[in-house]
Each structure stands twice: as structure tokens, then as C-alpha cells.
Image (cartoon, coloured by chain):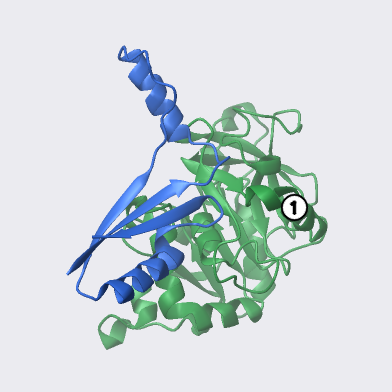
Amino acid sequence: MVVAEIRIELKPGVADPEGKNTKKALELLGFKDIKGVRSIKMFEIEMVADPETAKKQCEDMCRKLLANPVIQKFKIDLR
Amino acid sequence: MKDVKVCVLRIEGTNCEDETFQAFASVDASPERVHLKQLLGQCPSDLKRDLGSYDILALPGGFSAGDYVRAGAIFAARMKSGLKKELISFVENSRPVIGICNGFQILVELGLLPAMDGTMSDIPDAALYTNDSGRFECRPTLLKQEKSHKSVFTADMPKGTVVMYPSAHAEGKLMFPKEKEQKMLDRLLENDQVVFRYVDPDGEYAGYPWCPNGSLHNIAGICNPAGNVLGMMPHPERVLRRETHPDWTREEWKEDGDGLSMFRSAVRSVK
């Protein structure tokens, strides 16, 4: 079995209101040393497949559902 | 007169199917609430439906599949994997398709909008992304009809008409890939695909709060180049009668709400 970690993040230059709002909230909680907050989504997918097939399938998953290439990029790590 | 059959398509989490049903019923069409599984054949045989047997397809608002992954993405991926051919032929047969709010997000994720290079793109060409405010924005919004050429949904709405349709969404900011943004916007305008833009009470294009989401060029709704596929964030089905306009007691009495004409002209176009 392999576990794929799929990291979906916003492309550079795309505004991140969730990150911005979280930063504001953290500052309101008293955290003064924050320079920036980015929101990133991670999917952990357990698969019964050899690593090469798993990677290919994960790329297909990103194209078909997990990432919108207009605003997001993805990175797949197998472990 | 022909009976106009409307497929009001839903999955789990869709929540505006009743208003959308009512919109079409009130203009003498025959709407039916259909679950996606009925079109995919994943149901008892007496419940199976064929998309091709309908005259109009409506994708109502809501939070399909809990808005997980991205708003509309799961609904779109499921439609695309099992219904791609049927959808393409439905659109190419010039039948009207309307997506409202979550339905607009689904049409964009499906690649049926903006569809500048063919009926359906393989991957999305645009995104409806989190509002600039980072919040769910819910209130009446004013829209100016921008389309120069008549289309099935705006036949009774000359260019420049301002209507009030309520908005209620957290992800309504239309975006194109950053590096192609201006070029794609120019093409969209050239193709007469911009249908609605957010305006203020003077009819001027204005920023927040009149534009609830920070959308590119104040865009609230677009259609495909042929004009038969329309997606919009605000909800025409919530203003079918004048009483659902927040200011109806202060305005001159009219029976119809601002939203009705869109459904009436769409139904008339296929009669």
C-alpha cells in the first residue's frame, strides 16, 4: 500500500482571503510576529497500487477534481 | 402548444431546486427534479431518465457535495465522467442550460463556460473563487444586462436593463489565469458573452458592497458564445413575484418579480 499526499495550493499572485483572515484573527489573539499566512489544502490518499501507477492516478485525480489549474497548483508525494 | 420539459438537476447538498422548479412551473413549463443518479442510470429502472428527453437543463443553487474540494467541483466531475457526451450534444442542439449560483460554479468547473474554444473544455478555463471579503455575502444585488444580441434568457431584457436579483455566495469571484486575464476578458467581451455586471443604484459599475465578490470586470453572469448556456451567481428564481423584492411596498406595484422574464423567455424559445 502507498499513501499519497496531495498538496493543493494557490498559484503565486492569487489572493488568499482565508490566509489573510486567519492572519488577522491570529494577530487579534495576540500573536505579533506573523509575517504571512497561506492556506494550503492537503489530501492523504491511501492506495493499493504500485508507486508508479499510484502517482499517475493521483495526477489524474488532480486534473479531474482536486485542482483547478486557473488558480491552483498541486504536488504529489508518495510514502 | 408544446409541453416544455425542464430537468432541474440535483445531487446531495443542492438546496434551491424547489425555487427553480417553481420558476419554470410558473411560466407554464413542466419541470422535474431529477437526481444525477437518475441520468447516470445508478437507480431502479423506473426512475431512470434520459437527459436528451428534456428541453431545458437547470442547475440550481446550493452547496452540492458540501462544497468540498471546491464549490461545484464534485458535481461537475461526476457529470463529466458519466454524462459528457450527452451534455455536449444537449448544448450543441441549442437547448438552453442555466446554472445559478452553485450551478454557475458547476458550469465553470465542467468547462461548459466560458467555452470560448469549443462546447466543453477538458479542464476549467476559469474559476469562481472566494469573495474578496473572505465571507459569505448575502443581500440584494443590482445587475445590468450587458448582452447586445438577444439570447434565449435575455430576450425580454434589452441591453442596459437593471434588475435586482439577490446574491448569496462565498465563492463568486470570476477569475481567469493571471497571465491571460486581459486577453480572455477581451475575447469574452468581443464574443458578447458578458450577460450581467454588478452596478450601484445609479447604474454605475461600483466596487464592494455593490459588487459582493470582487469579480473581474464586475461580472455576475456569462454565457457561452452561442448564448444558450448561461451561468450567474445571483438568484433570479428568488424574485419571481414582486413581494419577494425587499422594497416592493415602496415601488409601483407590478405582479412579476425581476427574475421571471428569464425563465419565461427561455421556455418560449423552445416552444
Q: Residue furthest bottom?
A: B45
Judge whether B55 appears above or below B28 on screen: below
Residue B147: % across, % down = 77, 54
Q: Is residue B135 visible?
A: no
Judge whether B53 appears above or below B242 on screen: below
**Chain ID of residue with mark 1:** B
Q: Which residue is mark 1?
A: B157
Residue B260: % across, % down = 60, 53
Q: Residues within 10 Å of mark 1 (few under 14, many from 20)?
A: some
Q: Is residue A40 visible?
A: yes
Judge whether B166 appears above or below B261 on screen: above
Q: Number of marks in the image? A: 1
Apparent colour of chain A: blue
Chain ID, green in image: B
The kind of secondary structure element at disc 1 is loop
Q: Residue at x 65, y 80 (%)?
A: B92
In front of the other: B216 or B47: B216
- The kind of residue tagged 1 is Met
Left or right for B244, reference B143: left
Residue B94: % across, % down = 67, 77
Quadrant in the picture for residue B263? bottom right
State the quadrant of the C terminus of chain B. Answer: bottom right
Q: Residue at x 56, y 37 (%)?
A: B213
In front of the other: B137 or B60: B137
Left or right for A33, reference B236: left
Q: Residue at x 45, y 79 (%)?
A: B83
Q: Residue at x 40, y 67 (%)?
A: A59
Residue A19: % across, % down = 42, 32
